[in-house]
Image (cartoon, rainbow, N blue to C red):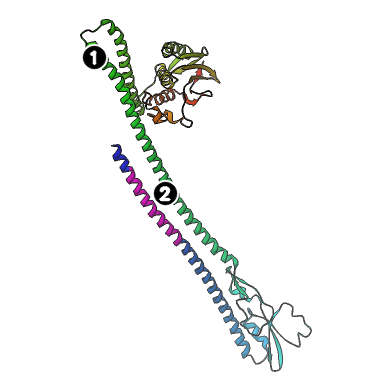
Amino acid sequence: MSRVTSASSRRALIIFIILAVLFCVQMGWWIVFQYRLAGNTRRFLASTLEEHKAQTIQLLNGRLATAGQAVEKVSGDLTSIRKDYSDIISGVASSESLENSDLGDSLFMIRTINGIKYYIFLDRNFPHSLMSGDDRLEYTAPRGEVSMFNWITPMHLQVSPKAYLEIEGERSSHTRMFLMEGSFFFLLIAIGGYLIFLSLKRLKQTREEQLLFVHSITHELKIPITSLSLFIDTMKRRNYDPKLGSELVPKMKEDLNRLNQLIDNILQVRRLADRQVTIRTERIDLSRELHAFGQKAKDRIEATGGRLNLNIDEKIKIEAGLPELVRVWELLLDNSLKYGKSDGLEITISLRNRKDMAEIIFSDNGPGFPPGMEEMLFEPFFRGNIEEKKTVPGSGLGLYISREYITRQGGDINIRNGSNGGAVVIMEFKVIR
């Protein structure tokens, strides 16, 4: 089953990579296309503005040319022409009347009719009347004498820099838009790839944990079953000594209890995962119960050549489920006995009131665990370094069950390495008065 799952995961990853590459190529092409399109749009709009400028110059000069033709047709006094072209011609005066006059910033043409020189003054702001409301063009009024009526040139009428800035702004806005969209989709691809990587990594880790679990369970089951089989074979012998039976029966019972506990742990994990466990809490004297547990655990620890230290503050009460709490303590004690030193094992159980929080501490002088595994140790079937722990009995369920029991009672539990070595497990509950 695991091989099928692994093959399916690899196929899914390959398909995802192919689709991601195709998407990235498509997205890259789309970004380049949009960028070029924005450039072409900018050039088109700039060209449109230049055409608009040329058409406006042509329109203005056409009106001026009409006035010029009218002036050329006049054979007498030019003052009458002003009435018909008041928007272009602001005044007409003979040279005699303007003798010694300062023309200043005036724009004018000179025409000689019947031997009399006339100054035809032109309205410098004439284009504004026809360009009213068009802010795309900027007009610069000329001054002095002009030789012809169509005096407006591209030098006098320019495209406003603001119009070019608007075009550039529009292009920049579109560029930012599709770059952000492209980046967003690239980010989604990256996140998807990362999530698949994490999924595959987790799948690999789960497979390793499952293999370790199978190995551990097999080991845990095989030892008591083999032991029971040997005991039964011994008791079946014809020259069976009844005195030997009194020695074997307790050991058989111990092996049966070990099997029963292992099966209970496996079933409990399933019930915890399915939220089928209900913990009934009550007011308990934590100091008294921890003392009682310590006294029971003392004989077991000393039987292995170890030592138990109790540092328990008195009269500390909490709201919790006592059977589940004792089960957690037993699991922690089992871990210390399994992973602790073979000689000179020392376990310390402490209880103190710290800022209205009951702090229960289980510590030992064992090897501890590699740094960075504090949270992973509470995951089901995880047992730290796999290769090093294969020879140690256990299923990797103890700390998982402990955390589930503690947190579902409103408490907290964490683990760390001790300053002088060994593991330190700290449980916290709110103190009640």
The percent position of residue 408, horizontal first and vertical second, equals 42, 24
Question: Residue 54, located in which quarter of the rendered image?
Answer: bottom right
Residue to which mark 2 is pinned: 189
Quote the CA–CA distance across marks 2 and 1. 64 Å
Crowd class of label 1 (few under 14; some 14 to 19; many from 20; radius 10 Å):
few
Name the residue furthest top. 243
Name the residue furthest right. 100
Q: Residue at 45% of width from left, 54% of height from top?
A: 182
Secondary structure, magenta segment, majority class: helix
Q: Residue at 42% of width from left, 30% of height from top?
A: 385
The percent position of residue 224, horizontal first and vertical second, equals 30, 19
User: Which residue is more in the foreground, 392 or 163?
Assistant: 392
Name the residue furthest left. 238
Q: How many marks?
A: 2
Q: Earlier in the sequence, mark 2 or mark 1?
A: 2
Residue to which mark 1 is pinned: 233
State the mark number for residue 18: none
Q: Amino acid at mark 2?
A: Ile
Crowd class of label 2 (few under 14; some 14 to 19; many from 20; radius 10 Å):
some
The percent position of residue 166, horizontal first and vertical second, equals 55, 63
User: Which residue is more in the foreground, 316 or 336?
Assistant: 336
Task: Identify the element where label 1 is drawn.
Answer: helix
Examine the rendering and report whether any part of residue 201 can be seen: yes
In this view, 144 is above or below 414: below
User: Which residue is more in the foreground, 166 or 345?
Assistant: 345
Examine the rendering and report whether any part of residue 285 can be seen: no
In this view, 25 is above or below 69: above
Is residue 19 covered in magenta? Answer: yes
Q: Which residues are magenta?
A: 9-33
